[in-house]
Amino acid sequence: MKVIVAIVPHFQGVADAGRFADLLGPGFDVVGLDADVGAHGGSHLADAEAILSVFAPVTAAQAAAAPRLRLVQCTSHGFDHVDLDATAERGIAVCNVGTSGAEAHNVAEHTLLLMLALAKRLVEGHNGLIAGGWPGRELQQLGMTELEGRTLGVVGLGMIGREVTRRAQAFGMRVVYSGRRRHAPDEEAANGVEWRELDDLVAESDVVTLHVPLTRETRHLIDARRIALMKPTAFIVNTSRERLVDTDALVDALEQGRLAGAGYDVFDPEPPPPGHRLVRAPKVALSPHTAGATGESVARILEWAVANVRRLAAGEPLTDVVNGVSAPARP
């Protein structure tokens, strides 16, 4: 079976085609390509049966150029870099690592890291010291605060959202949540959470954290109207996808003092250009899409993704299908 491994440049080194080949073992012809599968895939696309995508785009044109393609396996929770409509039309299954738990606790830890950095004004304190100052008074004026007793609004109470909830509760936070569906009362009780409609959640929360995929429905889920509902002392934390939030509206609110801060691990595009508004905004704590990129979590993610390719080869059911296509038979 021919397998294309496509990796965006800024994730090369985190993962490489040779590592995937070693994990897959004998019986697989693994070809490594850079992010532009269409430009460099060429003849490889013609007989590829699976693409392992490390954030590399898979477009309608690429799907059309791959008549034997049966699986696009994303090595991430996110799948917005794949054309779901085009793949579904051609009977190509698209899968993520959603139920693996491979990065759940790692992303949850990073979410708390960003929350704490904002609450304690870590970035401003660090920069002040590096500049030769002693910025204690400035940090107080910026609203240095604590998480104890605050309300956390979790948008998306899936595997990662639940891990964030558990850690936030250990810091004494009260948790409300919103999402595509409300959980059963016994699940809410077990997780110690309360349901809120999204407008109510953003208005009530001291911290809003996002843990949903980017789709047509969730693009700018947090828009200018919802940002205006938030407390001026509130923070937004985003370890999912930048476009879940209207960036211009967010930065406007930060610059005008209508929000207290934002913690981000995700950008559009990645890496962000020097003039990206979020990178230049005040009161932000930023990291370069590393929330799920520890050595331990990457190993778990790659193994989970590779296991799905093995399932395809064996004719077994695939896990974490996101476009409604079951594993098609080999042509």
Image (cartoon, rainbow, N blue to C red):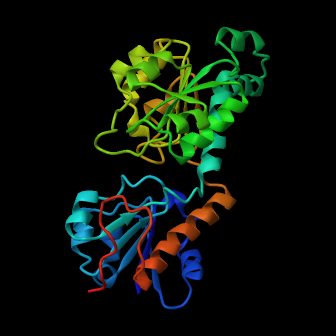
Residue 286: image x %, image y %? Answer: 58, 36
Residue sitting at 63 percent across and 29 percent down?
115
Residue sitting at 65 percent across and 35 percent down?
112
* Res 238 visible: no
Nearer to the camera, 276 or 284? 284
The relative height of residue 258 versus residue 315 in the rendered view (above or below) is above
Report whether 5 appears left or right of 290. Answer: left
Report whether 213 appears left or right of 176. Answer: left
Residue that extends furthest to the bottom in the rendered view of this protein: 27
Residue 260 lies in what quarter of the image? top right
Report whether 176 appears left or right of 171. Answer: left
Residue sitting at 30 percent across and 61 percent down?
324
The relative height of residue 203 versus residue 158 in the rendered view (above or below) is above
Q: Quadrant of the C terminus?
A: bottom left
Residue 80: image x %, image y %? Answer: 36, 52
Number of numbered discs overlaid on the protein picture: 0
Residue sitting at 56 percent across and 45 percent down?
160
Residue 321: image x %, image y %? Answer: 38, 62
Nearer to the camera, 182 or 75? 182
Nearer to the camera, 294 or 203? 203
Residue 223: image x %, image y %? Answer: 35, 26
The relative height of residue 11 versus residue 318 in the rendered view (above or below) is above
